[in-house]
Image (cartoon, helix red, strand yellow):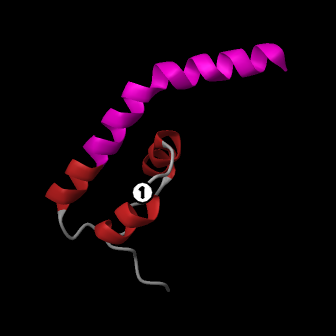
Amino acid sequence: MERPASLDALRDYFAGRSDDLLHRVLRDGVLVRDADSGRRAEFELNVRTKYLDFLPTLLRYRQLVLRDA
């Protein structure tokens, strides 16, 4: 079995990715290891805060795209 990625490795990998993608990873992913729950909680809070800030724009965008489809 492959070794779980560290929080730093995940943060670096997902840097610059969309807030929607990060939200989906946290929502649908499975926590395999929790070596530092404080840092994980801070990371998740940051991701979810950014996603919720962006959500109205994302929903409006999707509404416009679907309307024109």
Is 26 drawn above or below residue 39 in the view shown?
above
Label 1, on which residue? Answer: 15
Q: Residue furthest left?
A: 38
Where is residue 67, by image quadrant?
top right
- Secondary structure mostly taken by the magenta-highlighted segment of the chain: helix
Please give left or right for residue 8 compared with residue 18 in the image: left
Q: Quadrant of the C terminus?
A: top right
Q: Which region is colored magenta?
A: 44-69
Q: Residue furthest bottom?
A: 1
**What amino acid is labelled 1 in the image?**
Ala
Residue 64 colored in magenta in the image: yes
Query: Could you say which is closer to the camera, residue 52 or residue 29?
Result: 52
Query: Could you say which is closer to the camera, residue 20 or residue 38?
Result: 20
Q: Secondary structure at mark 1?
A: loop
Residue 63: give x, y in percent of width and height.
67, 16
Q: How many marks?
A: 1
Is 1 drawn above or below residue 20 in the view shown?
below
The residue drawn where x is 48% and y is 84% is 2
